[in-house]
Amino acid sequence: GVECINTLPGDDDNFPSCEEYRQYVVEKWIAEEGINGIAMKPCSNEFMNEMVPKWKAQGVPIVTFDSDAPNSTRVRYVGTNQEFLGRTMARLLRQLRPSGGSYAMIARKEGRDDAFIEEIERYNNRDDRAHWHELSENYTQTGNPRCSSCLLPGRFMGVMERAVVHNPHAMIFFKQSPMKHENYTDFIDAHRHRGITYIGVDGADYQLEYLSQRYVDALVGQMPHEFGTDAAQALFDFYDNEGELEPDVVYTNIVSYNVIPLELPDSDVNDNMLDDIIWVGYVCFGIVSFS
C-alpha cells in the first residue's frame, strides 16, 4: 500500500516564513519517514528553484499544485487553466446579461483577465450580438491595475467603490479576496438598486452561501479535490514509468455555479433549421396526404 503524510493549515504558525516551514517539513520527512515523493503548493519561485533540485537529487520528486514553479525541475504541475476559467466567466456573464453593457474588473489575475476580455468582446463587431466594454473611467487609480500586492487606494473595496459610481452592469472578481472583505455584503446591499451582476471565482462554503443569498450571481472555480488526486497520481506514475512523466502540466476541471431566476423570459426559439427548404416538406406531405 501507499502511506500518505500531510500537513494541515495552521501547522506553520510558529515559523516566520513559508520557505522555512517547507524546508523544515520536507527535510524532516526525508530524514525520518523515508518519503518517496512530495506534492506541495510552492512558496516563492526563488525558494523552489533552489530546493527542488536538491530534494530531487535525494530521490524525492516534487509535484506542485495550485501555483507553479516551472523552472524548479518539479516533475509535474497540477493546477487551474487560467485562460479557460476567464473564458467561462465571460460566457456566464453573456448568459446572465444577454443585453450587454459595461463591466468593471476587480482583483485582476494574469491569464484570467485577458481571456475574459477576449471572450466577452469576441462578438462586439457583430450587430446581432450584445456588445460589452470595460468602464472607460480610471476607477483603479493606478498604472498597473493587475497588481494585487501594490497599495491600490482603498485596496479592492476602494476599487469597487470607485467603479460603482459609474453604474457598471457587471463587476467581475478574478480573485477570492474582494468577497473575503468584512464589508463585502454591506457593499452589495448598499448598491442592490443599481442591478449590478456580480461574478466571482472559487466555490468556498461561504461563497456558495453568498450565492444562495444573492450576494453574488455566479461563481467559477476549480475542483479542489482534483489537486490531491491528480498530484498523488502523478507521483505514482513517476515511479511506475521509471522517472518519465508526460505531460508536465495537468489542469483540473472547472465548475460554475449560478442562480436560475424563478421567472424566465418567454422562449422565442426558431426551430426551423431548413430555411426555405421547409416548403419542399410541406409540398411532399400534401402529395402523400392526398394520393
Image (spheres, grey):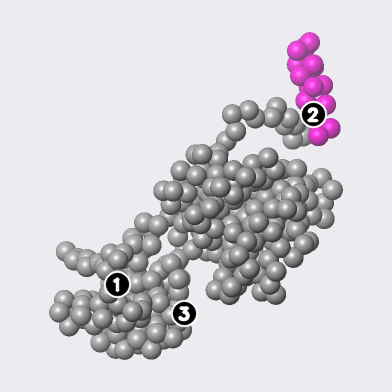
Q: Is residue 119 visible?
A: no
Residue count near mark 3 (Cα–Cα under 10 Å), binned few <14, some 14–19, many ≥20: some
Judged left or right of residue 257, residue 102 is right
Q: Earlier in the sequence, mark 3 or mark 1?
A: 1
Q: Which of 153 and 102 is in front in this view?
A: 153
The image quarter in which residue 150 lies: bottom right
Q: Earlier in the sequence, mark 2 or mark 3?
A: 3
Q: Nearer the viewer, mark 2 or mark 3?
A: 3
Name the residue: 75% across, 12% down: 289
Residue count near mark 1 (Cα–Cα under 10 Å), binned few <14, some 14–19, many ≥20: some
Please give the residue where the numbered disc 3 appears in the rendered image. 70
Check residue 283 for magenta coloring.
yes
Could you give the CA–CA distance between mark 2 and mark 3, rounded to whole angstroms? 57 Å
Q: What residue type is labelled 2?
A: Ile
Name the residue: 34% across, 62% down: 228
Q: Looking at the image, is 173 positioned above or below residue 271? A: below
Please give the residue where the numbered disc 1 appears in the rendered image. 12
Residue 97, percent across and down?
Answer: 69, 43
The image quarter in which residue 231 lies: bottom left
Q: Which amino acid does label 3 sit on?
A: Pro
Residue count near mark 2 (Cα–Cα under 10 Å), binned few <14, some 14–19, many ≥20: few
